[in-house]
Image: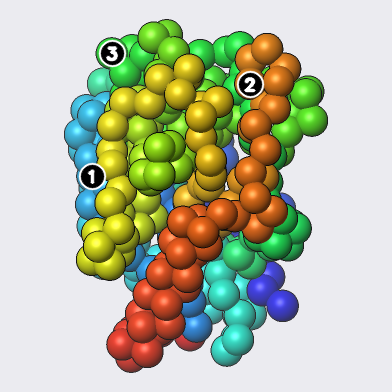
Amino acid sequence: MVRAVGYIDGEIDVLENIKVPVLDRGFLYGDSIYEVFRTYDGIPFMYDEHYQRLLNSASLIGMKVTHGPKQISDAVIETLAKSEVCAGDDVYVRYQITRGSGPIDLNPDLSEGNRLIIIIKAVPKWNPDHYTTGMSLAVPVLRRNSVTSLDPNIKGGNYLNNILALAQAREVGADDCVMLDSHRKVTECSNSNVWFVIDGKIVTPERGNLVGLTRKTLIDLLTANSVIAEEREIDYDELKNASECFVTSATREVMPVCSLILEDGSKCSFASGGGPKTRHAMQLYQQMLVNFKRDNADQALF
């Protein structure tokens, strides 16, 4: 069993003993960026792509990242050694860079320099029913932050918008939310990308969301297999015409959706376990992972 451990500025301990200073700007203001990757048979999945996305987040908030990819990977390997991970296990790795500590003042120039935090634990075990039947979604009243206020491609530590939207969805009995922007366009779920089949085509929102790496991988897979996957604006009013729905993320992979509660309380129901296009997407993704593990066995961290 993987022991949950953490790293903060060179110190490694069991996760519950890791403490962030109260003057850290990530704690005080959400002034931080992060990435999450997972392993398959000990092989880190899309490590380089995650680091490049971290740099993009940093550029969007004007943060100079002082930790290079090798420095982070060395720290991850050092932390993994304390997690008692062994062959057959797979881990969730979150690395977060805050702007560091400083006085209680919004001015980022007063920070004392980056702080690196790493969390390693077992890969989340999602409810198996979410794959055999599907998860449920709901459209909350709360709207997604405007892209001109807080760019969703800042993968940062400020998640209050998502938390409140998720809470509203949970209040009506759903597992997660589908957030709209102020123009009633679909953006994303609380921490995953969302997809629909509308008029026989697979579509996913083109803006107002984090450009997910799993999402990009699946688009490439579908395209390579002659399946059209469109990135486009999706109006709320189109959702009642959707015949299928699924979500993607690094830890969920491709997860079917069985129902969607709309703003007026009405419900769209989808095929249990996903319709034909959802199941095809799931199969393509799983075959890609089989190939990935076969072709990258020499990259295993443990």
Q: Amino acid at mark 1?
A: Leu
Instruction: Select label 3 or label 1 by which is in front.
Output: 3
Q: Amino acid at mark 3?
A: Thr
User: Which element type, helix, strand or loop, lies under badge 3?
Assistant: loop
Name the spot of residue 6 as percent of width and height, x first.
Answer: 57, 58
In the image, 297: left or right of 268? left
Instruction: Select label 3 or label 2 by which is in front.
Output: 2
- Tell me the tag on residue 12: none
- Tell me the tag on residue 148: 3
The residue tagged 1 is: 55
Q: Give the colour scheme shown.
A: rainbow
Q: Amino acid at mark 2?
A: Leu
Asked whether the beta carbons under mark 3 and mark 1 sit within 8 Å of each other, the answer is no
- Give the mark count: 3
The residue tagged 2 is: 262
Instruction: Select label 2 or label 1 by which is in front.
Output: 2
Measure how far apart labels 2 and 1 are at the Cα level.
36 Å
Q: Mark 3: few, some, or many residues within 10 Å (few <14, many ≥20)? A: few
Which corner quadrant holds the N terminus? bottom right
